Amino acid sequence: MKWNPVYRRELTVNSRSVRLAAILLVFDSILAVAALFNMYSVVGQVKVTAEIQYSRFLELYTFVSSIEFIMLMFIMPALTASSVSGEREKQTLELMLTTTMKPREIILGKLFSALTMMLLLAVSALPIQSLVFVYGGITITDMAMLFVCHGIVAAFTGGIGMFYSSLFKRSTIATVCAYATIVLLAAGTYAVNVFAYRMDMNELNSYLNALNASVRQPSSGGFIYLLLLNPAITFLAVITRQAGSGNVRLAFEQWFGAQPDNAVTANWIPVSLLLQLLAAVVLIAAAVHTITPVHQGKKGSKKTGVKRLREYIRNERRRAC
Amino acid sequence: MLEIRNLQKRYGNFQALDGLDLTIPEGETFGFVGPNGAGKTTTLKITAGLLSPDSGSVMIDGVDALQDNRGLKGKIGYVPDFFGVYDNLKVSEYMEFFASCYGFEGREARMRCYALLEQVKLEDRADFFVDGLSRGMKQRLCLARALLHDPKLLILDEPASGMDPRTRMEFSAMLKDLRDQGKTLFVSSHILSELSGLCTSIGIIEQGHMVLEGSMEQIIEQVNSSNPLLIQVFSNMEKALAILKSHPCVQTITVKRDEIKVGFLGDRQDEAALLQQLVDADVMVSGFMREKGSLESLFMQVTAREDEKAVIRHEMESGL
């Protein structure tokens, strides 16, 4: 099997870097401390009340998964947003683009090396996460589902980072834009829904007061579909199903009011994961297009009528001079 | 090997290339000269497939570079004016990485890399980290990298800039070896003395278009023919001056002891006829030759700004 050259080189360089070891140390230390604290408090409660609350172990699962998710949301953009722009800054991108390697291979090599780092983090957290198996409540299928969710969210946030990295020459600007987009997706779409829900509630309250009757439940309306692109909501839906109330729809109704009854809301998790995967593919394709220096079959850049007219006037002036 | 026709490239309001035409036959070493901002790097980048022109065509060994970008990359090796190196990567790993970018893997890649490191005299540095190499070594490594897929055309952008004279000479010798192996070299440089020793043909670019192009011999002859004749007279100076004053090709005469410097507008046949005339008139001539010109003086003449050219024209017309 032929390895992607960029992926192989990234693995070599990353394995020699202190950064990877430092990230692993910090990440696993946080999880280990949290797990130990959780078990200590459970045992402490047993000593006092002689009863074990099994829900506390599920809390541990939720906590570890949430930390993993947050790390994923924050580390992936940092890793990918400096990937292509970093190559530009080191002046190595041009060297790679003069080889017979395709721009697609460069982007995919970079993305997969970042995903591998995330995989390494997830695998290193498995022993701590597996503590829940001692007491039960979470199945292997649940873990696999969470893994898929994390993988797709990593591809999506990584795609955002790759896109900005290919667009901007400076890694700093690319990183800022990637984080801004992720904050906009996570907090922005949530804020829009909460705002729409509150507005609808106020409107209904005044209407109901006037009529003194019940008409319908308040909701955020069509804005709810924006949340399909919110990785945090997708993760919350997965965790709610596995370790929460188990009813995603009910949880959403608590947060954003009445939900429309259709195929999208009924299959929220698969639909949102599919959409995010699709968005990741589009972003990666855009990144490939951006770094391609000469597009096949393109002979000269396209000029609009205005550009042509300006060039004609400029040439005429030059001739007159 | 390389044929560029009517290449145009504009950056905003700045016309970088304005109808550039260029032809480099196979096996030639073409020196590409021009002042800063003349469009050299833009031309090289378009040729290397790193930049898209606004219009024009680039043909490399029968491949349309703008239509078949992948086909083009198999035929060219590019050495830019900077060193693209990675931290935490050894010389051998750097070479093997680029070998795999060209599709070479395993033993074949290692053999190829070692042979090239030997060619650029870096075989003993294979286990050194790339970012620890000296500037000259990095440039040699860049050359080895560009040769990994045995390209027919090697594009070098200011290859010797920032090198000390010894390293520059060594690098130049490596390029001469490549020239002798039959590679076509397209070299841009500011160091004209270096180009004159390396190149078989030369082109001067100014404001995005070629102002002078030809073989090295033609260019040197052109440089020399615009220089004054130096005649050393052993005896009969008066007679020699009388002949020169009456000669239609003579423009200016300057006498310094036994040497006469003559502004002479004529070809080699006219020169021979003048010498014959002097000898027939019993003028004893001990030296008769054109003053040697340099590529630098030609470059300065060709790329002189319009106002400078106007002053030179005025001086010539007024006989100053």
Image (spheres, helix red, strand yellow):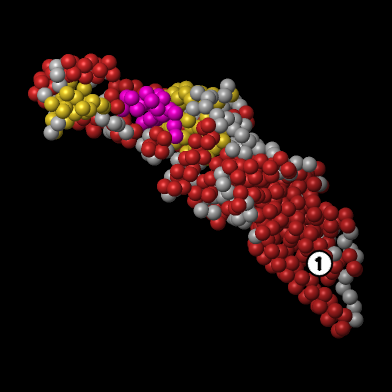
Quarter of the view holding residue A286: top right
Give the residue displayed 69% in from the left and 48% down from the top: A7
Going by the image, does A189 lie left or right of A53?
Answer: left
In the image, A215 versus B49, the foreground residue is: B49
Write the start and end of the magenta stretch as one range. B198-223
Q: Is residue B144 left or right of residue B231?
A: right
- Say what secondary structure mark 1 lies in: helix
Residue that sits furthest to the left in the current view = B238
Q: What residue type is labelled 1?
A: Ile
Asked if residue B162 lies in the magenta stretch, the reply is no
Residue closest to the eye, B7 or B311: B311
Q: Nearer the viewer, residue B220 or A3?
A: B220
Q: Mark 1 points at which residue?
A: A128
Reply above or below: A259 against B266. Answer: below
The x, y position of residue B65, in whole percent, is 56, 27
Question: Residue B48, located in which quarter of the rendered image?
Answer: top right
Q: Residue furthest bottom?
A: A48
| Chain bearing mark 1 | A
Q: Is residue B279 above or below residue B12?
A: above
Q: Is residue A97 left or right of residue A112?
A: left
Give the x, y percent position of residue A164. 59, 47
Where residue A62 sits in the image (x, y, percent)? 79, 64
> Residue B58: horizontal and vertical position, in percent?
52, 25
Check the picture and name the quadrant holding the C terminus of chain A: top left
Q: In this view, does B163 lie to the left or right of A10?
A: left
**Residue shown at the point (83%, 53%) measured from the top left:** A145
Q: Which residue sits at x=54%, y=54%?
A: B133
